[in-house]
Amino acid sequence: MPIVHSFDPPERFIAGTVGEPGERTFFLQARAGNRLVSVALEKQQVVALAERMDQLLDELMQADTQGVVPAVAPLDLDDSEPLDQPIEEEFRAGTMTLSWDPADERVVIEVFPYSEAAVVSPDQVDEDFEEPEPEELLLVRLPAAAARSFVKRAGQVVEAGRPSCPFCGEPMDPQGHLCVRANGFKRRDP
């Protein structure tokens, strides 16, 4: 039986980072009272979760006739505060699922730990595969307005990293980077 870190709903559910741009560690963090859970994940996982959550909310908004899903994040739910301390990684995120519970009108996020055993190689795709039971998982159930707020903050967190090179689009360090469009010459932040 896995340990389930359940928040229904959390007082706070955010994406945040620790470290300098280019060396940041990304976290999902849920808090309710004095319970705090921090799950490490990759930047691309934050992007994927926020984009898919935004799409889900847009789809629900179009189908919704009762106004449960706001078009934009309510200003009173804006959260620009840093991650809560102490940041103690419960696990590193692997698979994440996202769904809508119409009975409770909640977005449901499940985050499972990364597991080498769950990685399938291309030659195993057609084989029957049974994913191992996770030892723990993060389960968060958010009202639609809080989900919109999560999406807004996640976008801000991702964009707060290194600036992109105007020529190749790759992230630039303060010292510049080797730009493929400059034939190996170093470009510097303008």
Image (tube, rainbow, N blue to C red):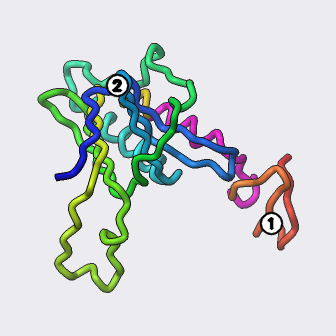
Q: Single out the mark in the foreground, 2 or 1.
A: 2
Seen at 78% across and 65% down, the residue is: 179
Kindly identify which numbered label has been placed on residue 178: 1
Residue 152 lies within the magenta run: yes
Give the residue type at disc 2: Ala
Looking at the image, residue 8 lies above or below residue 131? above
Q: Is 157 placed left or right of 28 in the picture?
A: right
Looking at the image, residue 130 lies above or below residue 102? below
Residue 76 lies within the magenta run: no
Q: Position of residue 91 (x, y in %)?
A: 40, 51
Residue bearing mark 2 = 32
Q: Which residue occupies the foreground of this view, 97 or 139?
A: 139
Q: Position of residue 105 (x, y in %)?
A: 20, 27
**Disc 2: CA contacts within 10 A as few (<14), some (14-19) or many (>=20):** some
Residues in magenta, as a range: 151-169
Looking at the image, residue 188 lies above or below residue 74? below
Judged from this view, the residue extending furthest toward the left is: 103
Q: Which residue occupies the foreground of this view, 62 or 134?
A: 134
Q: Position of residue 154 (x, y in %)?
A: 50, 37
Seen at 72% across and 61% down, the residue is: 168
Give the residue type at disc 1: Leu
